[in-house]
Structures are given as C-alpha cells and as structure tokens.
Amino acid sequence: MSNFTKSLVARFFIAFFLLSSTLYTGSFAQVIGNCTANAGSARSVCSSSVTLTGSVGGTPSAANPTWTFVSGPVTPVIATPNQLTTNVTGMTETGDYRFRLSQPCGQGVPATSVVTITVKDCKPPLAQLVTYTLPSQPVQDQILTYDGSPGNPPAPRGSDAEDGSLGGSTTTSTLIIKALPANGILSYDGQPLSVGAIIPAFDATKLTIQLTGTGYQSVTFQYSFRDSDGLQGNIAPVTVNWSQPLPVTLVSFYAEKTGSSVLLTWRTSEEKNNTGFELLRSADAAVWERIGFVKSQADKSYVNTLLNYSFQDTRPLESAGYYRLKQIDYDGRYQLGPVRSVAADGSRETVLIYPNPTTDKLTIEGLSGKEIIRLSSESGREVSVIRNESDKQKIIPTQALKPGVYILTLTRTDGSTLTKRIVKIR
C-alpha cells in the first residue's frame, strides 16, 4: 500500500471516530455509538477501601464490564473486576487513585470511563473536657441549659481538622451521648436522652438537665462527636459542680384535726446535711410562729430511704390554723415547705367529701372553682391530679383503685390546703 493510500485510510478512521464517539469529560463517561460506560463520580474517602459502582448501556445489550486500576500511590486489589459493583481494598496511602470501567462495544473500540477516588488523611473529631461550677446554689428540680448563658453551663465543644469548630453555637455537629449522669434528667428538645442517642445538627440551647433528687453536688455526662466523614472521636465528660448538696426531698406533709389537737405528719425520701424540721403555725398564713422542732433521723449522714415524722400540736389556735415545715441544714441554710390548713374548732368545713369509705366514686362539694385536687397513695405516689377551673362539685372515679388508704389534698388559690384520708373498699 502506497503512503498516499495509508494516509487516506488513516484519515477515514479518524473521521469515523470523531463522528461516532463522544467523550463526556465532566462525568468521565464515554459513548461509542450508542454503547456507554460510566464509572461514577469522583469522591473522597477516609478509609483504605471503597465500593465502585458503574453502569453500562446501549449495544450490545449484554453487560460485560471490566474494572482496571489506572494509577495511584500503591496498587490496590479489585475484588470482582467483571462486576459493575465491586469492592476495592489496599489503598493504604493517601492520594488519588484512578480506576477505569470498560465495556466492549462490538466495533473494536470499547466504551471506557475513569473515576478518581481520593484517599484523605482524615483525623477523627476531638471532644473537649468541660467543667463548670455554678455561681449560686441550685434548688431541686431546677433546669439548666448547656448554652453558656449567665448561670448556665457551657455547651459540649470540640474541633475537627476538616469541619472546624464543633458544638457550642454551631448546628453542623453530630453529638453522641455515651454515658448519662447518675443524677438528674438529661434531655434534648424536651425529650429525655438515653445512652447512644445521636443528635444531628446539635443545638446547645436544646440540651438541658433537670436536677431531680437530693444529696449530690455535681452531675456528669459523657459525649463524643461524629464529623462529616462519618468518623467518631474520643469520649469526653461534661461536669457541672456546685457548693452544697441539694436539700431534703419532701414526699408528703399533712395536717389533720384529731380531737382537741392537730396531728402533723410528713415523709422524706432523701436527706443529707439535715439537722431537722421546725414546725411553724400561723393564723393568717402570713405571720408565722415556731411551735416545735423535730430532729432529723438521718443523723448527719446521707439517707435515700423513706423516713416518717410526726408532731402533735396540743394547743391549736381557736380560729382556723395554718402549718408549714422549715427544713434546716447544719450550715444554717433552710427551705420552707408547703402550707397546710386546719378548720377552726367547732366550725364546719365548707368542702364536703363523700362517701368515705368509697367503692366506685368520690364526690367533692363546696368548691370555689380554682382548686387543684390530688389523690395519692400513703407512700406519696400520685394517683391522679385534677385542676378545677369552674365547677362547684367534682366526682373522682375510684373503681380502678386497689383497696387501701389514700390521701386527698385540695390546694386553694391562696396556697392553703385541705387534706383528707380516704379509704377505698371493694
């Protein structure tokens, strides 16, 4: 064949190729006629392994793909090179790895596509230890928000090489709860958390703890962060401290007329640093006088079992009387309990509660329309709570209650209460 003929044939094949094939450099997919191959999109990974997923189409209809390694820092292993989806392992060094997907097209020229996988030097996020001391003594059931606002502890915080600062006021972090506090209720967006809870788009203003119970001076939970690469970092604690243990937990306090005396009874579930209880009495629930003192049964130690107390006022007021407890710590700190009222000697209580004993229902008459009615077991467990808005009479179903003794407490708008023991029979 002459040089002229060779040149003519070469030009023919070049023209044929240009007319019948197109290379899509944006997606690295090649089309030969209507025969296609696509190795997928370039991406970055943090591990030494990756899954390649390609696609082929056109004529011939039967897929006969082949994955091959093109270039990279080291030679990886392609698990199943003749499958469109295959796993690649052994990318043990960072850098760019290029893989080619080929599909025979029956024209002597296969459709090919190349994808680049970048292995990054990824580092897991770093969670920081957080310790905070409250500026003032908290009270039982107080709620703290982990947002660093005045009087509140700071948020969990950390950093990531790729993502930057984590926690705090950012909402791009994923927080994972690794351990709950031994005391208190840790919640997010109003819902109690559990170990292993995952919080995407973490917002510190939604993370709270309610200081339930007594006898402790700190709360600690543990957390970690997960970054945008899916890597989970170290575990770090968040601790909040304060100077004194939380005060005594009062389960119940009752005042009842017994003949010519008034019997005061109360029960606690936890005590620490408690010297005892002053008994206060008032004729108007405004000016109070001390009528007695009952020493704590905890005897300077921490007790988290039920303790029962009583006091007899043998010389009650002739008019209606009000009573309350004043719990005193050894360091002089104190807290005041709820107010209880007792009707005057010889007077008739305007609120009627019947029948007692009861079987299926309890009727309460003489209400003003703004009371809170609580029914509790003798141990202090609340059975039901009714907020009376306008009714002068309320009926409380009791058929579902087990036989036994219950305490009905009616709280008025002025803070005074009426307490009655209710007996449930079959």
Image: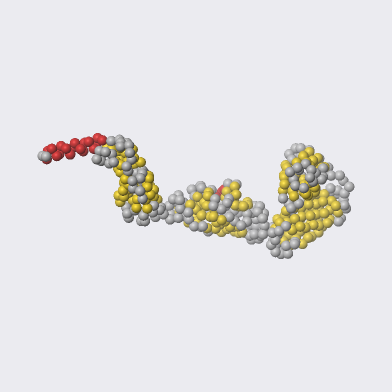
> What residue is drawn where x is 17% and y is 39%?
10
Q: Is residue 49 left or right of residue 408?
A: left
> What residue is drawn where x is 39% and y is 52%?
49
Residue 300 placement: quadrant = bottom right
> What residue is drawn where x is 41% and y is 52%?
46
Q: Which corner quadrant holds the C terminus?
A: top right
**Viewer can see residue 114:** no
Residue 65 placement: quadrant = top left
Q: In the image as oriented, which residue stretches furthest toward the left?
A: 2
Q: Is residue 122 left or right of residue 196?
A: left
Quick one: 72 or 260, which is closer to the camera? 72
Label total for image: 0
Q: Which corner quadrant holds the N terminus?
A: top left
Q: Which colour scheme is used?
A: secondary structure
> What residue is drawn where x is 75% and y is 47%?
402
Q: In the image as oriented, which residue stretches furthest toward the front?
A: 62
**x, y (%) of residue 57?**
33, 38
**x, y (%) of residue 270?**
70, 58
**x, y (%) of residue 6?**
14, 39
| Image height of 23 relative to 313, above or below | above
**Viewer can see residue 107:** yes
| Image height of 9 relative to 197, above or below | above
Quick one: 154 or 383, which is closer to the camera? 383
**x, y (%) of residue 202?**
52, 48
Quick one: 268 or 274, which is closer to the camera? 268
